[in-house]
Image: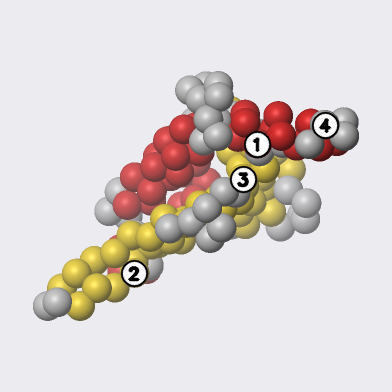
């Protein structure tokens, strides 16, 4: 799903049982193409945690962000959220101070970011507009 088709990505994990589909996980990424960065958030339903879904979802966030030319992926989590912190560490994220004392920021440079899709093009358009060329 894409909220506006350009700078927001939403991923949903669903489960189907007895012809009924239920959302069991969600991730959202807000892309800043000018900065080639993406801020993400994610959640997994309580009954579906510790089954590898969070790792798979975070891996897909990384893959899709890199494909869009995002070089830096980051998010904030509570210092007490040991599950997310462990997941992020396992995926190679680094930690820094959050905006509030109760938060920690997790961040990762995406080495396989696409050099020209589509954020690169949007960044060039934005730079052109700043210079009065658009």
Tell me the crowding category of disc 2: few under 14, some 14 to 19, or many 20 or more residues within 10 angstroms, Cα based. few
Position in image of residue 45 (x %, y %): 37, 67
Which secondary structure lies at badge 2?
Answer: strand
Position in image of residue 114 (x %, y %): 51, 25
Whether the residues at callouts 4 and 1 have beta carbons within 8 Å, the answer is: no
| In front: label 4 or label 2 | 4
Q: Quadrant of residue 23?
A: bottom left
**Residue 12 seen in this snapshot:** yes
Question: What is the number of the mark on residue 133?
Answer: 4
Which secondary structure lies at badge 1?
Answer: helix
Q: Tag 3 or tag 4, which sits nearer the N-term?
A: 3
Whether the residues at callouts 2 and 1 have beta carbons within 8 Å, the answer is: no
| In front: label 4 or label 3 | 4
Q: Tag 2 or tag 4, which sits nearer the N-term?
A: 2
| In front: label 3 or label 2 | 3
Tell me the crowding category of disc 3: few under 14, some 14 to 19, or many 20 or more residues within 10 angstroms, Cα based. many
Render colour scheme? secondary structure
**Quarter of the image containing the C terminus?**
top right
| In front: label 3 or label 1 | 1
3D distance between C-alphas at marks 2 and 1 = 32 Å
Residue indicated by mark 1: 122
Which secondary structure lies at badge 4?
Answer: loop
Question: What is the number of the mark on residue 23?
Answer: 2
Q: Tag 1 or tag 3, which sits nearer the N-term?
A: 3
Whether the residues at callouts 4 and 3 have beta carbons within 8 Å, the answer is: no
Tell me the crowding category of disc 4: few under 14, some 14 to 19, or many 20 or more residues within 10 angstroms, Cα based. few
3D distance between C-alphas at marks 4 and 1 = 14 Å
């Amino acid at each position: 799903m894409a909220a506006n088709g350009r700078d927001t990505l939403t991923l949903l994990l669903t489960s189907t049982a007895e012809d009924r589909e239920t959302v069991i996980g969600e991730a959202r990424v807000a892309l800043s193409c000018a900065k080639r960065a993406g801020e993400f958030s994610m959640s997994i339903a309580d009954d579906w945690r510790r089954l590898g879904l969070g790792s798979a979802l975070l891996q897909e966030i990384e893959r899709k962000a890199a494909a869009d030319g995002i070089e830096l992926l980051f998010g904030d989590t509570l210092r007490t959220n040991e599950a997310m912190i462990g997941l992020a560490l396992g995926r190679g994220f680094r930690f820094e101070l959050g905006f509030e004392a109760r938060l920690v920021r997790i961040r990762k440079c995406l080495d396989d970011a696409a050099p020209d899709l589509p954020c690169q093009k949007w960044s060039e358009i934005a730079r052109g507009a700043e210079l009065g060329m658009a």
